[in-house]
Image (spheres, helix red, strand yellow):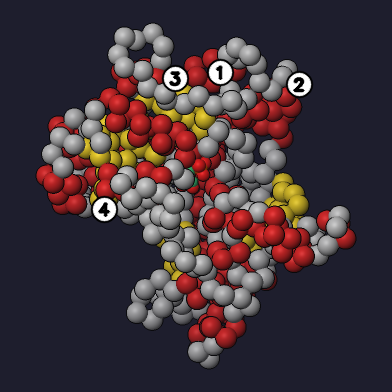
Amino acid sequence: MPYFNMSAEQISRAMHELIPGGNHTYSKGDDQFPGNAPKVMARAKGAYCWDVEDNEYLDWAMGNRVMSLGHANDHVDTKVFEAMRLGANFTRPGILEYELAAYLTDHWPCAEMVKFGKNGSDVVTAAVKLARAYTGRPYVLVCGSHPFFSIHDWYIGSTEMNSGTLPSERPYTLKFIYGDRGSVEAAFADYKDQIAALILEPVKNDSPYADPRPSDLTQSGMNRNGDNTGNFLQYLREKTEAEGTVLIFDEMIAAMRFGSRGAHHHYGILPDLATFGKAISNGYSCSVLAGKREIMDLGGITHDRERVFLLSQTHGSETVGLAATLATMRFYNEHNVEDHIWSIGRALKAAVTDTARAKGLSERVRIIGFEANPQILCFDESGAFSSTLNTLFHQYMIEEGVLIPWITITHAHRMAEVDRTAEALDRALTQLESAIAADAVDRLLLGPAQKPVFRKYN
Ligand SMILES: Cc1ncc(COP(=O)(O)O)c(C=O)c1O
């Protein structure tokens, strides 16, 4: 049936018949959203998106956090059209590969060399492979406090949803806890001289200073004496150096939140390798592996060491993603988007905190994390995360036309969007408060509560 004769509900059902999961990212799945969530999207512009029935939503999520400037940014799209007209992919390297490599190696302190991909998982896996080749060691120590690094088996095998991965590979992925030096020390003691790489998001919701926390920090992450003592990232830098382990920062999310130079620049700690993607290209497909020449060059063709099959992708140098990345980076820096993101985040955090307090829900609805990368979470009476209450909260926000399952602030989000969200929150939290008072949270849900992505069975 042509889709224009179908309701959104019908299209969604048909998509589940045609596509396992009904879409291409688990976190966009029906099991992650309330029953009244828009089913299928048609278009988006700036901070707004519209479903196939032309319902409008204020979008704080921005796909899987793939925007820094907003949907369909005119400047980026113009540069993309220009690149498309010059050809999408060439038989030999394209000039954009040079232009972007020169820009990024100049821009990111950790980048002596860069290699391009199309998605984050591939460059993260490439970083792990390089680290193994460089060190000749088998184990990888991954931050278990962070939810996701790659679709590839070395990582998926370490999750609850490990069906189809090789049991023999699983023991080689070890986990540590963010901010917990003991968990890092234990892994290095148990696997002495065997850990090739330690990988983490440099910063997520916790400050690198949480362990132990010096009293007088400045925004830059240094304390006022310019002393990095107490910085977990600095500790990891020193520890991995002492152990001969490659330190990898996954900057996929952190980079454009903590400035376009990345969280490693923000905190002044240089990893050996770093991975970038998502918002660097404002929705188009581009990812980057960056790092030290000595390690990166193992993937090259001019050295006399053993060759490493690093990344070799048909679409790796496709020009649209490269043009989009260059245009996004330039726009972001010329318009000081970093400061804008932090200031809108500050206003949004205040709006959520104030409204929750006014409704007597401070303990039940909280906005956590840094201003540049906040997250709204709902809790039960005991203080544990409540997926049921969270789902009902989002159901009420969607009724108000606000999509805020996760938050990706962009240049297109302005105070008007914060004000609209504050008004929506006021009405949503009034309903939520009544639902809690009437002990009716489960009953009022229009569909099942959200489930964790990484679970063994549906
Ligand atoms: C921290 C982090 N690393 C890697 C990835 C994988 O990126 P991609 O989905 O582009 O493969 C993600 C995706 O959500 C991520 O959040």
Which of the marked residues, 3 or 4, is nearer the chain's N terminus?
3
10 Å crowding of disc 2: few (<14), some (14-19), many (20+): few
10 Å crowding of disc 3: few (<14), some (14-19), many (20+): some
Instruction: Check disc 2 and give the amino acid type.
Output: Arg
Which of the marked residues, 2 or 1, is nearer the chain's N terminus?
2
Looking at the picture, how far across and down is residue 313, in whole percent? 54, 26
| Secondary element type, mark 3 | helix
Residue in the picture at 64% in, 72% down: 35
Residue that carries the numbered disc 1 in the rendered image: 97
Residue in the picture at 60% in, 58% down: 21
Looking at the picture, how far across and down is residue 397, in whole percent? 62, 69
Which of the marked residues, 2 or 4, is nearer the chain's N terminus?
2
State left or right for residue 281 relative to residue 305: right
CA gap, disc 2 to disc 4?
48 Å
CA gap, disc 2 to disc 3?
28 Å
Residue that carries the numbered disc 4 in the rendered image: 177
Instruction: Check disc 4 and give the amino acid type.
Output: Ile
CB atoms of marks 3 and 1 within 8 Å = no
Foreground tag (3 vs 4): 4
Which of the marked residues, 2 or 3, is nearer the chain's N terminus?
2
Q: In the rendered view, would you say 385 is above or below 413?
A: below
CB atoms of marks 3 and 4 within 8 Å = no
Instruction: Check disc 3 and give the amino acid type.
Output: Asp
Residue that carries the numbered disc 3 in the rendered image: 106
Looking at the picture, how far across and down is residue 46, in whole percent? 68, 46
Looking at the picture, how far across and down is residue 193, in whole percent? 15, 35
Residue that carries the numbered disc 2 in the rendered image: 85
Q: In the rendered view, would you say 436 is above or below 310?
A: below
